Amino acid sequence: MRCKRIRKKLAAYLDGELDERQKALVKRHLLECAKCRKEADLLGRISYLLKDRPRIKPTLSFEADLWRRIYSLEKEETTKKETTLYLLKWATYIILPAAVAAALIIGVFGENLGEKIASFESISLEEEYLSSIGLDSFRDFPPGSLSQAYFSLIEQTK
Amino acid sequence: MLDPDSQLMLKFKSGDTISFEKLVKKYKEKIVNVIYQFIGDKEEAEDLAIEVFLRVYRARKRYKPRAKFTTWLYKIAANLCLNEIRKKARFQTVSLSESIPSEAEEKLMLIEKIANSSPSPQDILEEKERNTLIRKAIDSLPAKQRIAIILQIYEGLSYKEISKILNCSVKSVERRLYRARTNLKEKLAPYLKGEKYNGGF
C-alpha cells in the first residue's frame, strides 16, 4: 500500500515538484525499497530517452509565410469592412428612402381602403335588412313618389 | 511586475510591429518543436506554429497580461494541437497508432547522417528504429497526457505552469504525468534497460 502511494509520487519527485516533507518521505522509502527504486530508475530513464530526441529548426521562410498570412487576413478583413460600408451606403441612399415611400403609400391607400371597406360593410348590412323583411325588390322607386317616401320612413326607423 | 515578453506584447498592442517580430523570432523554434513533438510532422508543425502567431497577431487589441506571455503562447499552441488531434480522430485521416513522421523526411535525415557519418550505419539504423519507437509511444498517449509530458520534458515547464496552460489543477497535471510515464514505460521497455542514465535520486 505504501509502495503504491509512493509510486504515484515518483514522477513528481523526479521532476523536483514535491515539497520538502514529501521529498524526504519518498527519498527515505527509496533507500529502503528496491522495487520502488527500480521503478524510479525506469521513470527517470524515460525522461532521459525523450529529452534526447532531435529538435527541429523552423524553415527559413517561416516569418515570410507568417507575414503572407497576416497580409491576406488583413485584406480579407478590409474587404469585409468595405462590404459592410457599401451595404450601409445602400441602406442610407436607396433602401431607407424606398422603405419610407412604401410606408407612406401604404399609409395613404390603407386609410382609403379602410373607409371603402367600412362603407361596403354598411351597404351590405342595409341590403341584408331589406332582404330580411322582403322589401328589397321595391327599393328603386322614382324620387318624390309616395312609395319612395314610405321606404325612407322605414329606413329612418332602423 | 510584467515579464519582458508581456511588455513587448503591450507595445505591439499599441502599434509597434517590431515588438511582434521580436516575439516571433524568440519563440518560433520553441513553438514549432512543441507542436512537432505532439503532431510528429514537420510541415504540419510549421503550419500550426504560423497559426499560433497569427492568433497572437489577431488578439493584440484584446490582449491583457493576466499571465506570463509564454503561458498564453503555449496555451494557444496546446489548444491548436488538441483541436488538430480531435479533427484527425473525427475524420480518421490518420491513425494514431501508425507512425506519423513522413517517410521522406526520415529518409532525408538518414541520408544526411550517413553522409556526415561518424557513427556506423548500424548505429544510425538503430537510432532511427529507436526514434520511430519513441514517436509511436508518444503518439499512443492520450492527447492530454501527451501535451503535458511534451511541455514538461521538452520545454522544462513546471507543473504549475502546465496547469495554467491546460486549465486544470496541479494535482491533475501530476496524475497525467505519472500516467504518461507509466504508459511510456511499457512501450519503451526494450530501450530503457540499455539507456545511459545516471539515476539522480
Image (cartoon, rainbow, N blue to C red):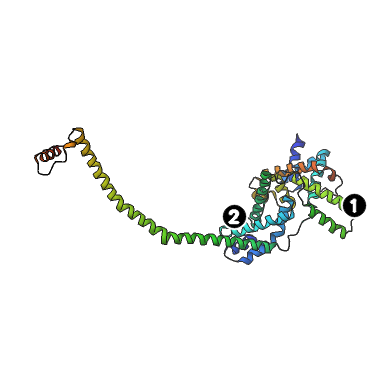
- Of residues B110 and A97, the one nearer the viewer is A97
The answer for how far apart the CA atoms under marks 1 and 2 are is 51 Å
Residue B38 vs A34, above or below: the answer is below
Dot 1 corresponds to which residue? B122
Q: Name which residue lies at 36% across and 57% down.
A: A100
- Chain name for mark 1: B
Q: Amino acid at mark 1?
A: Gln
Classify mark 1: helix, strand or loop: helix
Badge 2: residue crowd in 10 Å (few <14, some 14–19, many ≥20): few
**Residue B68: x, y in percent?**
64, 56
Relative to B194, is B23 on the left or the right?
A: left
Classify mark 2: helix, strand or loop: loop
Relative to B118, is B183 on the left or the right?
A: left
Q: Nearer the viewer, mark 1 or mark 2?
A: 1
- Of residues A81 and B124, the one nearer the viewer is A81
**Residue B4: x, y in percent?**
64, 62
Mark closer to the chain start, 1 or 2: 2
Residue B102 seen in the figure: yes
Residues at discs 1 and 2 in contact (Cβ within 8 Å): no
Badge 1: residue crowd in 10 Å (few <14, some 14–19, many ≥20): few
Q: Which mark is residue B135?
A: none
Do the residues at pointers 1 and 2 share their chain? Answer: yes
**Residue A9: x, y in percent?**
74, 42
**Residue A7: x, y in percent?**
76, 40
Count how many numbered circles sit on residues in the image. 2
Residue B170 seen in the figure: no
Q: Quadrant where the N terminus of chain B lies?
A: bottom right
Q: Amino acid at mark 2?
A: Arg
- Chain name for mark 2: B
Q: Name which residue lies at 78% across and 43% down.
A: B184
Dot 2 corresponds to which residue? B66
